[in-house]
Structure formats: C-alpha cells, structure tokens
Image (cartoon, helix red, strand yellow):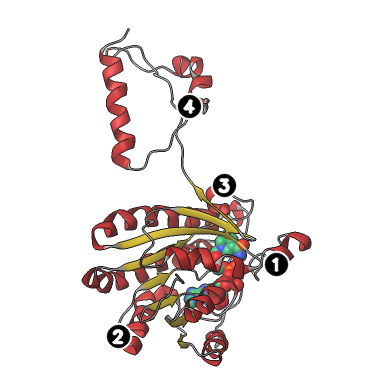
Amino acid sequence: MALRFDNRVVVVTGAGAGLGREYALLFASRGAKVVVNDLGGSRTGEGQSRAADIVVKEIVDAGGVAIPDYNSVVEGHKVIETAISNFGRIDVLVNNAGILRDKSVANISDEDWDKIFDIHLKASFVTTRAAWPYFKKQKYGRIIMTSSNSGVYGNFGQANYSAAKLGAIGLSNTVAIEGAKYNIHCNTIVPTAASRLTQGILPDEFFNQLKPHLIAPVVVYLCHEKTEDNGNIIESACGWATKIHFIRGKGSLLRTSLDDDVTPEFVRSKWDAINDMSEARHFSSNTEASAYLGDIIEKLKNPS
Ligand code: NAD
C-alpha cells in the first residue's frame, strides 16, 4: 500500500531549497497540502526572497496543492497560522530551516551564536508549541527535528551550530515523551546532503553522490500516520539510513562502601574501567537510566 497523505496538511520550514524542497515535493506528490515556508535569505541568513514561490509552482504544476509562506521560522507561530488560515488544520511539521555562521569558538560573536540558536533550536520549539494544540485536539501529529553529525560528533568551526543541533535532539526527546499519549510523534533526522550549506565543504566526488531527494522518503515515512516510531534519531544520506543511539558504559564504583568518600586517586585507579565501553548499553528512558543508579547504591550498601 502506498503511503499517502491525502487530506493531511504538512508544514515544511526552509522548503525553498535543498532538503526542505525535496520533502515538500514528496509530501505533495503523496496527496498532502503543503505549506512551503522559506524566508529566502542567504546561506548566512541575510536578506530575504520569494524562494518558496518556485517550489509552490513546481508542486502546483505537477497537480499538487501548496502555498508559500515567507515568514522567518523565528516567528514560527506565524508559519503555523498560515497552515490554519489556508487549510484549516496541521498534521505534520518538519523543522528544517537552517543557516550557517561558521567560525572557530574564539571568533563567534554573540550575534552569530544567537542567530544560529534562534533559527535551528528556538524556532523548532516555537513552531512545535504553536502546532501543539491542533495536534493534541485531533490526537494526531508528526514532528521532525533536524540535527546534524556536527551536533552528534562536533565539527571544527561550528560550535554554535553543533550546540544548537544537539539541542534539537534534546528537544525532540522530550517532545516525543510529552506527545506520546496524544499520538503526537517526534523524531529527529540527521541528514548529509548536497546543498548550499555543504557546497565547498564536502569534496566534489562525495558531494555529487549526496542527492537530497534520497533522504526525503525517510522523512516522509517517519511522518506517516501508521508509523509508530517516536523519539528516534535517524541518520540518512545517499540512499542509506540508520538509527543513532546514545550508549552508556557499565562504569565503575568510585568507592567501596557508602561510608567511603570519592578521591581523585581512586578515580585515577578506575579510569580504564570508567572508559571501558565493552559492556555499554542503551537506555530507552531517563527512568531506566536512573534505575541503574539504584543498583549502584545497593552495591555500595552491601560491599562484597
Ligand atoms: P539549504 O540552505 O539548501 O536550505 C535551508 C533553507 O532554509 C533555505 O532555503 C533557507 O532560505 C531557509 N531558511 C534559512 N533561514 C530561515 C528562516 N529564518 N526562516 C525560514 N527559512 C529559512 O540547506 P539544507 O542543506 O537543505 O539544510 C536543511 C536543514 O538540514 C538545515 O537545518 C541544516 O542545518 C540541516 N542539515 C543539513 C545537512 C546537509 O548535509 N545538507 C547536514 C546536517 C544538517
């Protein structure tokens, strides 16, 4: 059975180019009414243009339904309002808009820091908060947050971007927990794709293989009403996808009983065991991770 989005309204932010454009085109081809949001600024976020119009025309020419929205995602409530005032509902929100202000950490101005955080992280919260009452009322909503390997691993010259992109994962984790009982699911995409953000950064041969349209089916699948995934982080590029998990090592006790104190020397003596990831495991919730601490306290109470 084809995955359809008939009668569904999808908002894609930053859909005037790159990945967002591909998401918008694919959702529309599957029957969704699409809000193509894009401020149309430069790679570093200056100026604005009507980039969204071109994508809307592509969708309409192909027989689909779409409208442009030129608001900055920083005013994300206005983007959601475009969906409500034109289509009367919202079902899917893809937080995708982004810019870069790359500099090494000592050279990042407060403005470069704030701008990256506003667009990549705060805007994803503002759009989500604005869509929430509609999702909750209809007991259905699908949200995508967009992270980056720069957030997961760090990247030289991207302290602002890395921090905001890892923040998107934290935001998604909690949105997923709070939304679960209302059938509001939130997942994170970690893409690598050829776009103006990666042009000149990735080697040409690599860049040419990273077609953004190859990632769109992953995002569209995650947003379908029958897809149960919630709170997952999915990395995708060049026709490949996988899940990303945080894992935690088994660790080591840093004292022998509850009566002892922890000393730097004891920490030093256990450093190899602290860093040993051979028995690492994934915890699926904060509760599960904290429950493990109960076992540690029991061990300290009853030293063998
Ligand atoms: P892109 O520059 O082609 O597209 C981003 C779009 O967002 C642009 O059309 C831009 O005008 C729009 N935009 C920027 N600021 C906006 C604002 N304030 N309001 C509304 N629209 C705005 O870049 P892309 O590579 O397609 O990136 C899409 C998302 O994927 C970004 O969040 C980016 O950080 C993320 N990402 C991309 C890659 C990659 O390899 N391309 C890797 C990791 C993460």
- Badge 3 amino acid: Tyr
Q: Would residue 38 be visible to someone looking at this image? A: no
Mark count: 4
| Cα distance in 3D space between marks 1 and 2 | 38 Å
Circle 3 residue: 153
Considering the numbered disc 4 on the image, is that residue within a helix, a strand or a loop?
Answer: loop
- In the image, what residue occupies the spot 36% across and 78% down? 8
User: Is 54 situated above or below 258?
Assistant: below
Q: Give the numbered dot on residue 88.
A: 2
Left/right placement of residue 31 relative to residue 185 reads right
| Cα distance in 3D space between marks 3 and 2 | 40 Å
Mark 1 vs 2, N-terminal side? 2
| Cα distance in 3D space between marks 1 and 4 | 40 Å
Considering the numbered disc 3 on the image, is that residue within a helix, a strand or a loop?
Answer: helix
Mark 3 vs 4, N-terminal side? 3
Q: Position of residue 12 (x, y in %)?
A: 46, 75
Mark 2 vs 4, N-terminal side? 2
Looking at the rendering, the quadrant in which ligand 1 lies is bottom right
Circle 1 residue: 199
Q: Residues within 10 Å of mark 1 (few under 14, many from 20)?
A: few
- Badge 1 amino acid: Gln
Considering the numbered disc 2 on the image, is that residue within a helix, a strand or a loop?
Answer: loop
Circle 4 residue: 279
Of tags 3 and 4, the one toward the viewer is 4
